[in-house]
Structure formats: C-alpha cells, structure tokens
Image: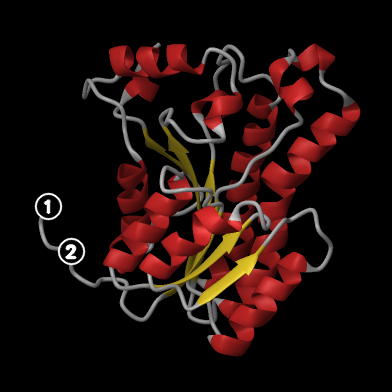
C-alpha cells in the first residue's frame, strides 16, 4: 500500500463499537491511527474486554473504557474522561446496533414493542446522545459517523426490524448535520456493503447477502473493513470539508443495481 500521510495528525477520535479485529469500527480506528489521529476506544463489557483491549493497545489508544449505552452514566463517564484528558474531540464513530434475537429473526409484523424500542434506543438514539455530548468538545468543528446499511432504503430479506431502525438513523444524521453545521461539525451516515462481522452473524441467510453483493457489484468484489475505514478517514479530513448530511455507500457499487 502507498504510504499514508498523517493527514489527521493532532486529531482526537472516539471509536465506539469494536468487538474484534473484524469489526467495521476497528477498520475505522486503524485507518484513523495510520492517518495520525489519537484514539479513544471502548468495549461493551468485561466479556468483550479481552478481545478489544489488545487491539486498543496495538493502536496506541491512550483512552479506553467500558461502554454499554444502556447502562446509566457510562456514556457520560466516557466523555468526562475525554474532556479531562484531551479537552477536545474531532471525530466520533458510532458503530453499534442491537435488536433482541427473537425480534430480529422474526418479521416486522411480529416484532414486539419492547424489541423495537430496544433496537431504536441502542442503534439510533444512542448516536443522538453521543452527538449531544461530543458537539461541545468539537470546538473547531469535527466529523461524526454512524453506520447504516442498504436495508435502510430498500427491502432486504431477513433484515426485518433493523430496516426501519437504520432508516431512522440515516434521518437522524441528516437532521444532526443541519443542526450542527453552523458549528463546523459534519455528520455522515456510512452504508457499507455486507461484511462478515459478529453483528451480521445474527441475520438469517447472511451468506446469501454476501453472494448477491458480489454478483451485483460493478467492481465484482466485496468491500472490507479497511475500505470503510479509509472512506471515513477521508471524510474526516479538510479535503471533505463541504460534504455533510448524506449517506455514503461503501458497497463496490452494488447499491446502484436494481
């Protein structure tokens, strides 16, 4: 690979959602780090910590913490640590999603109210809560990212409740881009092609989605986590200073096919 210039040197990035070295969030963190940014990395719980902490150490992340967005006070604690140690934030990555398995595996008609609310809170509203805490730290502007999927705008079999939830997330990105634009803060919904991540393993017939993506992509191949990471790194640089509010597909072009 061509040598990467430190175009993000001095930038401070919080990456939420790394589960292992196959995570989209890890691709983002690695790309940011190679471009010169300093990292804050979180893990979901003590069970996840042994898988994430070594990755954070390898990336030289000076700030690490446990973060379950459904646990009262944990999100605020992470931002208090960032405020105390850095006093600023330039980049925020929200790459978390959840729905109870019985609601995810069933059709939308059978999704419980409780399951829908849980999926919406973790997968969408937590990004809004993060944005509210991050915005005051982005004193010189910044960039926020939330991970979506093609199923937000098109029906993808077996994506079920996550389709409406991701549609809400993309709408939230547009409205946050509008509200925060005056502060120089840009907001992007990133829509990667299907990737073999732990989160994707919960979808029924996921291998069929992978095969279809390869067949439909004009580039003829699947994307990987670093494709997503480098797209986000570019969007975090001044080269993308006039881009905000849209959904950016990192899909090998498969999204243009009927």
Could you classify mark 1 by the number of other residues whose Cα lies within 10 Å: few (under 14), some (14-19), or many (20 or more)? few
Image x and y of residue 150, in percent: 50, 27
Corner quadrant of residue 2: bottom left
Could you classify mark 2 by the number of other residues whose Cα lies within 10 Å: few (under 14), some (14-19), or many (20 or more)? few
Image x and y of residue 33, in percent: 34, 67
* Above or below 95: residue 41: below
For the view shown, which residue lies furthest in the left direction?
2
* Above or below 120: residue 144: below
Corner quadrant of residue 138: bottom right
Q: Which mark is residue 44?
A: none
Is disc 2 placed on a helix, strand or loop? Answer: loop
Q: Is residue 83 left or right of residue 32?
A: right
Task: Count the labels in the image.
Answer: 2
Is disc 1 placed on a helix, strand or loop? Answer: loop
Q: Report whether residue 158 is seen.
A: yes
User: What residue is drawn where x is 38% and y is 51%?
Assistant: 27
Disc 1 and disc 2 in contact, CB within 8 angstroms:
yes
Q: Which residue is mark 1?
A: 1
Q: Is residue 197 left or right of residue 81?
A: left
Q: Which residue is mark 2?
A: 4
Q: Nearer the viewer, residue 111 or 176?
A: 111
Q: Nearer the viewer, residue 133 or 26?
A: 26
Q: Nearer the viewer, residue 232 or 205?
A: 205
User: What residue is drawn where x is 39% and y is 73%?
Assistant: 60
Q: Report whether residue 187 is seen.
A: no
Corner quadrant of residue 208: top left
């Amino acid at each position: 690979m061509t040598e990467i210039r430190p175009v993000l040197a001095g930038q401070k990035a919080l990456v939420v959602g790394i589960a292992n070295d196959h995570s989209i969030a890890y691709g983002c963190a690695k790309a940011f780090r190679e471009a010169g940014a300093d990292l804050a990395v979180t893990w979901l719980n003590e069970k996840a910590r042994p898988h994430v902490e070594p990755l954070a150490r390898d990336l030289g992340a000076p700030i690490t913490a446990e973060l379950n967005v459904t646990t009262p006070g944990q999100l605020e604690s992470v931002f208090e640590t960032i405020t105390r140690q850095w006093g600023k934030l330039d980049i925020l990555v929200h790459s978390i999603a959840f729905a109870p398995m019985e609601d995810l595996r069933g059709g939308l008609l059978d999704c419980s109210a409780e399951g829908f609310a849980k999926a919406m809170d973790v997968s969408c509203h937590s990004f809004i809560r993060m944005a509210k805490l991050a915005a005051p730290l982005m004193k010189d502007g910044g960039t926020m990212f939330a991970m979506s999927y093609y199923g937000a705008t098109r029906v993808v079999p077996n994506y079920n409740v996550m389709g409406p939830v991701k549609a809400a997330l993309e709408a939230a990105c547009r409205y946050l881009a509008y509200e925060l634009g005056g502060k120089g803060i840009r907001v992007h919904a990133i829509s990667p092609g299907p990737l073999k991540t732990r989160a994707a393993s919960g979808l029924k017939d996921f291998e069929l989605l992978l095969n279809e993506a390869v067949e439909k992509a004009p580039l003829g191949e699947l994307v990987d986590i670093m494709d997503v990471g480098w797209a986000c790194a570019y969007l975090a640089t001044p080269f993308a200073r006039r881009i905000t509010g849209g959904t950016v597909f990192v899909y090998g072009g498969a999204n243009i096919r009927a």
